[in-house]
Image (cartoon, rainbow, N blue to C red):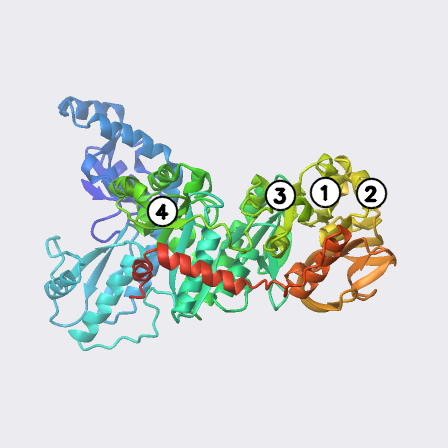
Amino acid sequence: MFIGQPNNPTGKSIPTKEIIDLAKKHKDTYFCIDESFADFIPKYKTLAKTDNLNIIVVKSLTKFYGIPGLRLGICMSDPGIIQKIRDAQTPWSVNTLAMKIGEKLFNDQQFFTDSVNTITNLRKKLFENLDKIPWLKPFPGEANFLLIKILSPGMSTKKLYNYLMKNGIIIRQCNSFLGLENTFFRIAVRTSQENNILLSSLKAFSREVLNISINTNQNMGTKTKKALPLMIQGTASNAGKSILTAGLCRVLYQDGYSIAPFKAQNMSNNSAVTLKGKEIGRAQALQAKACNINSDVRMNPVLLKPSSEKGSQVILNGLPAGNMSVKNWKEFKQTARTVVEQNYDQLASGYDVIIIEGAGSPGEVNLKQNDIVNMGMARYANAPVLIAGDIDRGGVYASFIGTMAVFEEWERNLVKGFIVNRFRGDETLLKTAHDYLFEYTGKPILGTVPFISDLSLPEEDSVTFKEGSYFSSMKLKKDKSKEIKIGLIDLPYISNFTDMDPLMMEPDIRIIPIKNSEDMDENFDCIIIPGSKNTASDLSWLIKKGFPGKLNDMKQKGVTIVGICGGFQMLGNKISDPGYVELSSESNKNSKKGLGLIDMKTVFYHEKQLTQKELRHTPSGSWIKGYEIHHGISQLQNGKVIIGSKNELLGASSIDGKVWGTYLHGIFDADEFRRWFLNILRKEKGLPPSKEPPLIYNIDTHLDKLADILRENLDIKQIKSIIGLD
């Protein structure tokens, strides 16, 4: 007796107890159970594990694992039966390659689990949508196929077969199965995209051949989305994904499309505040500006802000969701996935195009299982992918090939090409490498972007700053006696260091990162303590490294000392943390001594201050527009309020004004204020104040320049075609 488990073509299984009972009643009959499709059934228990001596289980691995060319299968039964089969078997029934692959397959439990879950979900959705077509009757199945009956009188599968064949779709006519007439056919459960193509073709057949109109409001398996997606991924962090995304956003905006950026999950301490008081990655705020739209929390629904070596503050939908360890984050990720998908669907419903940015590298095989930001996001959005690589770092072509090598087939199918970024030199020298890459991967290079040294656009994270390359593009004056030297303390958890960008564009300003207190021996004109994601921890680091004494020495020498956000809090006498927002409750210490450079104290509260502000800077009379992102409220004991009021202190200074700080990020973006501040430093150094009109810090100008560079160096026409805009 041969039994398909599940049956072909119905895809339905027989309860295993019924088979076992039948085998026990007929002990003189061998029951050969074909479990080739049984792996598709969740939690199925093979009949090979029964004690019945007359049950033989056979299984072809070509179905579940998709390896028909290897012709690999297994047979399981009582040892005596197996020996009889072996005696009749040909000597070399399975080749060595198939054996090796077979061992690998059974060890890949993750593939097994993912495949079962994926097929189960796709089959369920496909069945539900087929069931909405009135002239079809799909039969519930448990395998990777479905049996369907045509209900329309006089209609046979042959006519449908010929119609679908013209659209490149092949169905299995089932009239060759005993007991089934020519109104039955079978289809495979394919990818979501392929299933949608089938459903659309069946709708067309209904309309064109049967004159049946199917309600277009019915869900035929496609999400209601207006936007066409494109995704930019990279071979590594800092490959240039953020800037390329911003540039392509500006290009398409200039060409008349409504466009928005999206990054599912960002890990950065560089953040921005939306008009509605929500926190998102700084890069997505820049990309929104490139699209000429206001930044929106839906553009970056998950933001991780590292606050320790093994933990981050999780920002969900723009608000803090708590501090999580890596383990806790993994457990929380399914919740994050739902939030990501909901935000993407909402955002995509209102624009022509969404440019999606990936994170890190999609080739990190240890992170692929629960990925929501790279290929997992591309799959959800059905987005074509371009992979960017930084040739200035070296090894870019090996990185391209290596990334493709660790991809699964569906991932490789989503990749449409590569972008070589940050190239210096003659592009014609790259031809042989490009030819080699195309031969290996079948994917083209869509452009080579030159190394751009004079774009004043905010960086996504602190990678370039920590590597020391952030200031490498600064043009130093030959006469160093006429330059203003500003030291920027490189805190372990530095955040929003891009506050320095407007200063960097000034021709006589040199910014020098300070990694140790010994580095402050230079003749600085100003020291800046930047923002911090973990103010308490960074304050401890400053004290441990001997900065308080050095800073006091610098103050005595007349050097201006400035603190931004967390740096502003550190300038005070004391930081209290009664709710242990940053300080560890295990230490039983809920306060920390500050640097004592401003007579001020700060108290941390769980509620985070997230607002955009426009206020007057009292000493200069300039209007300052910026945003605050911080825990804590500061109270000035003795000093000067320079921004805000005593009840809402946003900026304060020492009595002599030599030490000052503010909660406002973006303070140096204000051109009049920046000129006033720098002229004071010039005067104190004995240099004449600048009489030229203030330089205009205009990000739009730099975005337009970036768009021009991309138009010149990328195949924009081909990229538009990939998106579907041609």
Question: Which residue: 30% across, 69% down?
Answer: 132
Give me the C-alpha separation between circle 1 and circle 3: 13 Å
In this rendering, does residue 594 appear at all?
no
Identify residue for label 4.
Answer: 116
Looking at the image, residue 352 sits to the left or right of residue 456; the answer is left
Label 1 SS: helix
Image quarter in which the N terminus is found = top left
Contact between marks 2 and 1 (CB within 8 A): the answer is: no
Marker disc for residue 311: 3
Between marks 4 and 3 in the image, the one whose residue lies nearer the viewer: 3
Image quarter in which the C terminus is found = bottom left
Between marks 4 and 2 in the image, the one whose residue lies nearer the viewer: 2
Label 2 packing within 10 angstroms: few (<14), some (14-19), many (20+) = some
Q: Earlier in the sequence, mark 4 or mark 2?
A: 4
Give me the C-alpha separation between circle 4 and circle 1: 46 Å
Q: Earlier in the sequence, mark 4 or mark 3?
A: 4
Q: Amino acid at mark 4?
A: Val
Q: Amino acid at mark 3?
A: Gly
Between marks 4 and 1 in the image, the one whose residue lies nearer the viewer: 1
Identify residue for label 1.
Answer: 537
Residue 89, position as x, y percentages in the image: 15, 25
Question: Which residue: 72% across, 44% down?
Answer: 524
Q: Earlier in the sequence, mark 2 or mark 1?
A: 1
Q: Is residue 443 above or below residue 672?
A: above
Q: Earlier in the sequence, mark 4 or mark 1?
A: 4
Task: Out of 507 and 68, give the one closest to the viewer.
Answer: 507
Label 4 packing within 10 angstroms: few (<14), some (14-19), many (20+) = some
Between marks 3 and 2 in the image, the one whose residue lies nearer the viewer: 2
Identify residue for label 2.
Answer: 552
Question: Which residue: 66% across, 62% down?
Answer: 627
Q: Amino acid at mark 1?
A: Ser
